[in-house]
Image (cartoon, rainbow, N blue to C red):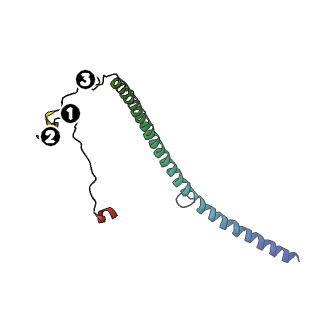
């Protein structure tokens, strides 16, 4: 019985040794820098560095855009204030029809011969949309 127990104990120790050897080979492949988890970590580290640089570039571009947009908004507010002042000053001008003086018409706007010289008549311009072809409208 002791002999059978010794044989089983030796076989178990031999099996555990083979199992440890296989695990050591797998662990060695797993930790190699080029192909294993080390390679994956190195690739991910390089990608993180690239993404960090790209993020910094995007952040600096966004900061520049914010600065230019702030400057443009300030210019627009200034222009709006100027327009408000100009419009307010137009309300202060006297009405030419109320003062009895009507500005003279330019020579190009005069009525053709044979028509009344009525100052109330003015040229009227009418804009019309061009007629579209059905094939063009369908596109």
Quadrant in the rendering for residue 137: bottom left
Q: Residue furthest left?
A: 113
Q: Mark 3 and mark 1 in contact? Answer it, CB < 8 Å.
A: no
Q: Which residue is mark 3?
A: 100
Measure the alpha-carbon separation of dots 3 and 2: 24 Å
- Horizontally, residue 21 falls left or right of residue 43, namely right
Query: Where residue 63 sits in the image (x, y, percent)?
Result: 45, 37
Based on the displayed image, in which of its 4 quarters is residue 13 positioned?
A: bottom right
Left or right: where does residue 80 sit relative to residue 44? Answer: left
- What residue would you read off at disc 1? 119
- Res 52 visible: yes
Q: Is residue 36 above or below residue 81?
A: below
Are discs 1 and 2 less than 8 Å apart at CB?
A: no
Please tell me which of labels 3 and 1 falls first in the chain: 3
Horizontal relation, residue 63 to residue 28: left or right = left
> Which structural element holds mark 1?
loop
Q: Is residue 139 visible?
A: no
Q: Residue at x 44, y 42 (%)?
A: 57
Q: What percent of the width, then of the height, locates residue 116?
A: 16, 38
Dividing the picture into quadrants, the one containing residue 58 is: top left
Numbered disc 2: secondary structure = loop
Q: Earlier in the sequence, mark 3 or mark 2?
A: 3
Relative to the observer, which residue lies in front, 79 or 3? 79
Does residue 67 appear left or right of residue 22 in this picture?
left
Tell me the CA gap for discs 3 and 1: 13 Å
Residue at position x 43%, y 33% in the image: 70
Q: For this rendering, which residue is in front, 73 or 30?
A: 73
| Pointer 2 residue | 115
């Amino acid at each position: 019985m002791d002999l059978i127990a010794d044989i089983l104990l030796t076989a178990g120790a031999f099996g555990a040794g083979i199992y440890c050897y296989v695990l050591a080979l797998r662990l060695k492949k797993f930790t190699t820098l080029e192909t294993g988890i080390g390679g994956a970590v190195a690739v991910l580290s390089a990608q993180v560095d690239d993404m960090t640089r790209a993020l910094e570039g995007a952040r600096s571009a966004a900061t520049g855009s914010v600065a230019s947009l702030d400057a443009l908004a300030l210019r627009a507010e200034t222009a709006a204030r100027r327009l408000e002042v100009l419009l307010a000053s137009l309300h202060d001008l006297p009405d030419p029809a109320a003062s009895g003086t009507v500005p003279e018409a330019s020579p190009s706007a005069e009525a053709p011969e044979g028509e009344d010289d009525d100052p109330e008549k003015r040229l009227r311009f009418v804009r019309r949309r061009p007629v579209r072809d059905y094939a063009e409208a369908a596109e």
